[in-house]
Image (cartoon, rainbow, N blue to C red):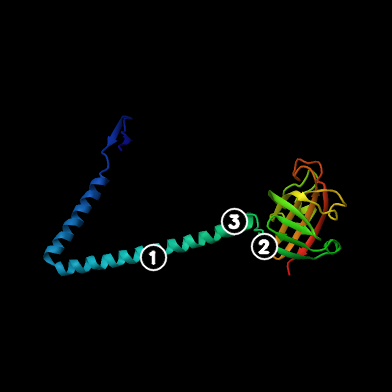
Amino acid sequence: MSVTATLADGRPTRRPRRLGWLWALLTCVVIGAAGAALYILQPETARGLWAGSTVVAGQAWTATRAGAGVAARWTGRQMDRVEARFSPAPMGPDVLLDGVYEPADDAARALGGVSFKGAEITFVEAPLKTRPGAIVLGGDRMSLRQTWSEATGAGAVEQVEVRQVTSGAAPALCEGQPIGWIALQPRGRDLMVAAFGVGERPAAAMASADLCGVWRYHKP
């Protein structure tokens, strides 16, 4: 790139282009020639210098890789923490509900125990056949008026399994009315059970959900 200067009479003139790249090329040639001369005149010294330089380069590469590994592990831990904070919590060890759960609050004790076998849920010898309906979060709306958390006590990021009842009856759950939906929220060995009447699945678009009751159980 040329640089423009100004003479005393105002006429512009140009300075010669800088030859920095020629100096760099010349420096490389001189260093290469010096290395070749050293190898010819003092081969042992040249080999020693080369070996030393390769050792230093190897150590630098090892240190770089180690630093990159530490950075990657640190970054991975940070991402795990972020995901753990913002991802929905797992449903717990009893995702596949099975066996008998004992009452854990007064409402459940008045109703009795509940047992699970595959898609079948039994309340006091009243089996209900169910099929998958949806997985929602506690912070999702159960209706226009309530979230699942507000209605059932589930955490805002905890998962709630909603099953549709396909056959069977459990008159004690909804004061003798048919049951349409069962909501289940395992938390370790604890379990929340909620029952809804027949109709559309509880969701945000509903004016109100036909919630019959909420019961809490514990697996012995």
The amino acid beneath tag 1 is Ala
**Please, is residue 14 above or below residue 213 in the view?**
above
| N-term-proximal mark, 2 vs 1 | 1
**Alpha carbons under labels 3 and 1: distance apart:** 30 Å
Instruction: Mark 3 or mark 1: name the one nearer the start of the chain.
Output: 1
Q: Mark 2: give few (<14), some (14-19) or many (20+) Cα within 10 Å.
A: some
Question: Within the image, what quadrant is residue 42 found in?
Answer: bottom left
Residue 167 placement (x, y as % from top left) = 76, 49
SS label for mark 1: helix
Between the residue at mark 3 and the residue at mark 2, the CA separation in whole angstroms equals: 22 Å
Sequence order check, earlier mark of 3 and 2:
3
Q: Quadrant of the N terminus?
A: top left
Q: Which residue is mark 3?
A: 83
Please state which of the two labelled residues, at mark 3 or mark 1, is closer to the viewer.
3
- Residue 204 at x, y = what percent? 75, 43
Which kind of residue does numbered mark 2 sit on?
Answer: Asp
The residue located at (52%, 59%) in the rendering is 76
Tell me the number on the disc at residue 94: 2
Callout in the foreground (3, 2):
2
Q: Is residue 100 above or below residue 88?
A: below
Q: Residue at x 70, y 53 (%)?
A: 161
